[in-house]
Amino acid sequence: MKIRQAALSALAVTAASVTPSAFAQSSITLYGIIDAAVQYANTGGHTVVRQDSSSVAPSRWGLTGTEDLGGGYKAIFKLEDGFNVNTGAIAGNGALFNREAWVGIRGPFGQIQMGNNYTPLFITYVNYSLGELNTLAWGNAANNYVFIPSARTANSVRFTSAVVSGFTLRALYARGTNGASGVPASLGDTASAGLNFKAGSFSADADYLQQRFAPTATLTPTTSVQTGRYYLFAASYDFGFVKPSALYQMHRNAGGLTTSISSAFASPDHDFYEVNALFQNVFGSFGSVLVSFGQYILKSNGDGDSTSYAIRYDYHLSKRTGVYAGVAEVRNHSKASFSVSNAGGPGISVAAGKNITSGIVGLVHMF
């Protein structure tokens, strides 16, 4: 018995001494953002006053983690859930981690990740739609015109290269509906690539994305599927006191399609652009003013065109808390119904041909 106890004690000591080197260091971080605001809007004679969630920053919480695998490699993951701060309800389609859910490897080559990912297009939208508290948000023209199925893709693999001479390559492939029954086999299949270049205060991006879509919301396994193609170009330069940026997107190969149908991954041929200027250190070193202008141009019919104007002031009360206020307007032609969209989803609904003028005041807290 004494020999057995001595052996077990020796084994325990050995295990304790081996554990720190046998299992690499890992970490998990819990984070989140809570955004609440009051918005006033006039939509062609109809007035709406409401409390909003996720206007400037999508209200969300998430987990990120890393494990050091040695040799410059790490296992990584991210799980992120959006929610409505006014009701506590899960945002989006009701999935728990509806914003991002992926696992991957980071190393000297760059990073590869699999799951529910943002596309290279979305990364460019975010990087060039400026703002102090958040980007691609309330007031950004691009945020009013982005087609969501081209921005986030489930069942996808995304690769981001290491930086080489200022260049970073991003690529993504997604299996759309991933073999779901009752729909065309290739519906939603997405392939995308983007190239970013940075040198000092200058940054530029060029992105391409193709996505399989159906021309109708009534889907069967034999529904005809086509390929829409997106081209996106953007640039910015930080002068210190002001940072201007611009982006321009074209969508082609959807001739005959007149409306967007999210369930069919369908968006008509169009162009849209956004021009921004972020004035920094306004009314103190913790404030900034965003001015944004942009237009949506429907290629098949000018009655589907729209123009967006906005100005927004962001101010940091502390490192984690900020306030904002802004005024925006979207002017729609007779067949357009774009609104001033929130960062976390659509804005106040607008009837075709009606304009919307909106003002907002809100609070953001990060943890």
Image (cartoon, grey):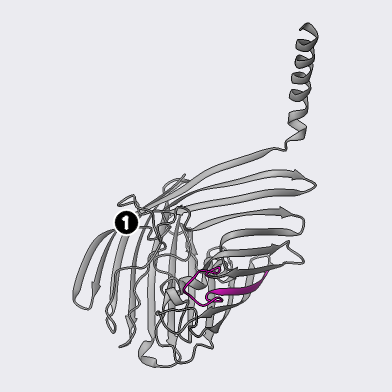
Judging from the image, what secondary structure is the residue with disc 1 in?
A: strand
User: Where on the picture, by quarter, is residue 51?
Assistant: bottom left
Name the residue at 46% across, 80% down.
266
Answer with left or right where residue 49 lies relative to residue 362. Answer: left
Q: Is residue 290 above or below residue 1?
A: below
Horizontal and vertical percent position of residue 285: 48, 53
Q: 289 left or right of 231? A: left
Residue 39 appears in the figure = yes
Q: Which residue is mark 1?
A: 37
| 245 in the magenta segment | no
- 179 falls in the magenta region: yes
**Relative to the observer, which residue lies in front, 336 or 224?**
224
Residue 319: give x, y in percent of width and height. 48, 46
Boundaries of the magenta span? 177-197
The amino acid sitting under disc 1 is: Ala
Q: Residue furthest top?
A: 2
Tell me which residue sits at (43%, 78%) in the image. 219
Horizontal arrangement in the rendering, residue 254 relative to residue 107 (left or right): left
Rendered image quadrant of residue 294: bottom left
Q: Quadrant of residue 342?
A: bottom left
Q: Is residue 296 above or below residue 241?
A: below
Residue at (49, 70) in percent of width and height: 181
Determine whether 259 is above or below 278 in the image. Answer: below
Q: Position of residue 157 (x, y in %)?
A: 63, 64
Where does the N terminus fall, quadrant-wise?
top right
Residue 367 image point, x, y percent: 47, 44
Most foreground residue, 66 or 183: 183
